[in-house]
Image: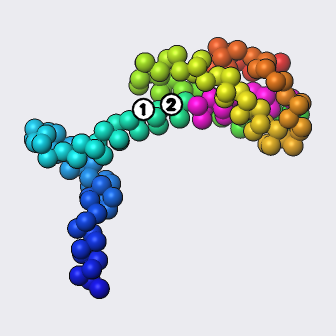
């Protein structure tokens, strides 16, 4: 049994067995200039994933911001410091992602409409209000949504 397990582990690469150790090994190989020993297939995939993760983070944070703005606008009696705090946090996260990767500065504009539709759906789920309560088109601009001071009247 143990022999069969060792054989299976030998067939499965370090990437699948221990991701953190694999990353550390790839870094060591890069630093040593041992490029021929790099796990290029998985390294390329991970680099692609890094860019996808940054875009996904921006989309996710933008949806949260838009959801809170909709709830702020349509449930004034429920307004809370938690909503305001969440707006501050998620706007800051978007700023941080763009500061870290300035090439993503235009990305929020690319996904604004799609994120608004998801935020509209989320706001309806969070509030229990019918989806048609929330405008089909965004009632505020991207610039307003990302403005640290903006909350709808």
Image coordinates of residue 64 in percent, x first then y, are 66, 34
Based on the picture, tell me whether residue 35 belongs to the magenta stretch.
no
The residue under the point 62% across, 29% down is: 62
Q: Residue furthest bottom?
A: 1
Please say whether residue 13 is visible from this viewpoint.
yes
Q: Of helix, strand and loop, which one carries label 2?
A: helix
User: Foreground residue, 23 or 100?
Assistant: 23
Between the residue at mark 2 and the residue at mark 1, the CA separation in whole angstroms equals 6 Å
- Residue 27 lies left or right of residue 71; in this view the side is left
- Span shown in magenta: 59-74
- In the displayed structure, would residue 25 be above or below residue 140? below
Q: Which mark is residue 55?
A: 2
On the image, numbered disc 1 is attached to which residue? 51
- Residue 82 lies left or right of residue 37; in this view the side is right
Please count the marks in the image: 2
User: Foreground residue, 38 or 83?
Assistant: 38
Marks 2 and 1 in Cβ contact (< 8 Å): yes
The residue under the point 68% across, 22% down is: 113
Q: Quadrant of residue 14?
A: bottom left
Label 1 CA crowd tier, 10 Å (few <14, some 14–19, many 20+) = few
């Amino acid at each position: 049994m143990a022999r069969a397990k060792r054989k299976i582990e030998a067939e499965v690469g370090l990437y699948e067995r221990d991701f953190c150790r694999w990353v550390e090994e790839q870094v060591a190989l890069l630093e040593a200039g041992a490029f021929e020993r790099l796990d290029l297939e998985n390294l390329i995939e991970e680099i692609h994933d890094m860019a996808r993760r940054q875009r996904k983070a921006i989309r996710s944070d933008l949806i949260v911001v838009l959801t809170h703005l909709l709830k702020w606008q349509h449930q004034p009696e429920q307004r809370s410091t938690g909503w305001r705090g969440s707006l501050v946090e998620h706007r800051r996260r978007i700023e941080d992602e763009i500061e870290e990767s300035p090439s993503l500065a235009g990305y929020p504009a690319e996904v604004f409409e799609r994120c608004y539709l998801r935020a509209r759906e989320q706001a309806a789920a969070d509030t229990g209000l019918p989806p048609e309560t929330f405008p089909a088109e965004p009632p505020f601009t991207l610039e307003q949504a990302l403005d640290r001071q903006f909350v709808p009247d």
